[in-house]
Amino acid sequence: MGRNTRKRRTSPATKAIAAAAALALGGGGLIWANFYASAHESHDDAWGGRTKAAGAQVATISCPDVGQKLTDVPGRARTEVDGELANLDRQITEAYQRLATTRDAQARDASFVQNSILGPLKDRRKVIFDRIRLEINRAGGTAPGDLDSLTSCTGSPAAGNQTNNGGGQQSGDENNGGMNGGQQGGEGGQQGGGQQQNNGGQAGNGPSAADFVDITKVQANVPAKPRRMRNASTGTFTTRCGVNANGNHNTDNVIVAPGVTNGAHHLHDYVGNQKVNAFSSNDTFLQGGTSCQNKNDLSAYYWPVVRVQDGTQDFDQNADGGGKEGNVGRILVAKQAQIKYVGNPTSKVVAMPQFLRIITGDAKAFTNGTANANAHWSCTGFENKVQLTDKYPICPRGSDVVRTFAFQSCWDGQNIDSANHRTHVAFADASGRCQNGFKAIPQLTMRLVYSVPQPVVRNGQVKNAYAVDGFPEQLHKAVTDHDDFIAVTRNGLANKIANCLNSGRMC
């Protein structure tokens, strides 16, 4: 099973999916389908591009997130296993298409979803699971014994106060956000301008009015920093790599889905290394060139774009990972992108290993739960007082929206990646110490500043909503924000960064 074979199987996955139907997943989660658009919507032209909390009846399909459970995959099998996980994503996308285009049949037959969608989906998932098991065993590993218990997906109508997979974020903030069931009425589908009336947003899958909060009304919540110890590494190293003004985008993710076109199902901004896509390799990275001023920094820094939903369209309105998968609106280019490495408050750091991969945050935190969530939203002038994880801030006039990321800063000392792309790195504890034999490495921090038209919430609707790109079933929630990094340096830069931090200098 070579790379070309996997590309052939997966690359056309979403091309036949219409905008209302292309809700794709990454190995598990919820699919939200608009069964019936509300018959009671008011249409106020003065609120063009608004997001409204709608009373649509929706249904969910919940599938276990298989990728996070595969923590012990032999290195020789990882590329193929990642490809099969992408095939699971495609299967769920196709199940959603079936769900979204058979509403009449579902209304006539209460068992239709189970018999015609969920049952066949389980059978198709089992075929993929068998291939995953085969790849792991062929490479000398042992597949989890309970893998088959993850084949079943369930369907149910959405309801207020629903608890999502993983015991994560409660949807109490969805009560006004369009997830409450209501009287079924009217026909489903998209409105002429691309406004689908279920969970708000121009593509019908968020954000909702309840996803925004006036930051001036939020109490201070930023904790004190850990106390610096005598052996602390107190320096900082800043690398200037621009804001992606040249529009280097794609919807791949070479860390999670190598060899799979549109493996991320949402659009990324790229700075630093300029040759990053699904088919990049370590050799490619070394030849990729960089947007960084320091030409020895070939690292790849990439994050999902932010869009403002003001009724406008962008270049990818009809593309996979863009409008076809619910990521709509005008892409905002950050006005500032600060990339800085900082030290450890309790110890010296060791240099990052070449080609280390780190993902911080969880693109599926709304359905997976918040165990891996690491979103931070604020406004200029408020960053030292208020950081939000599950809300988008409405900033006062003259203040800009800020996204910040603080990556994992402890490394297992051996691996540049792991099967679930998590366990080879970790966060320091509350005191700043690395646990379980992990070593302190320079902590990558990023600060992205955006000039965002101020959202206005009124009567359950929001004008000029903005949101981070993501898997559409995640409803564009703020908690799903995430960031990706691949360490690539030359001419001793990794050691220079570590030495700068350890010596307490600002470089």
Image: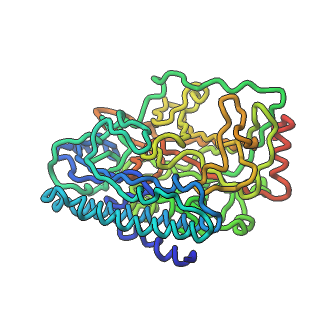
Is the residue 478 above or below the residue 311 in the image? Answer: above
Residue in the image at 45% along x and 65% along y: 129
Residue in the image at 77% along x and 42% along y: 237
Report if residue 328 is visible in the image: no
Percent x, y of residue 438: 73, 43
Decide if residue 91 is on the left or right side of residue 242.
left
Q: In which quadrant of the rendered image does the N terminus lie?
A: bottom right
Q: In which quadrant of the rendered image does the C terminus lie?
A: top right
Q: Nearer the viewer, residue 435 or 95?
A: 435
Is the residue 406 above or below the residue 266 in the image? Answer: above
The number of numbered discs placed on residues in the rendered structure image is: 0
Q: Residue furthest left?
A: 108
Report if residue 469 is visible in the image: yes
Q: Nearer the viewer, residue 500 or 42?
A: 500
Q: Residue furthest front?
A: 145
Percent x, y of residue 335: 60, 45
Which image quarter: residue 384?
top right
Is the residue 140 above or below the residue 475 in the image? Answer: below
Percent x, y of residue 231: 83, 31
Decide if residue 185 is on the left or right side of residue 425.
left
Which image quarter: residue 327?
bottom left
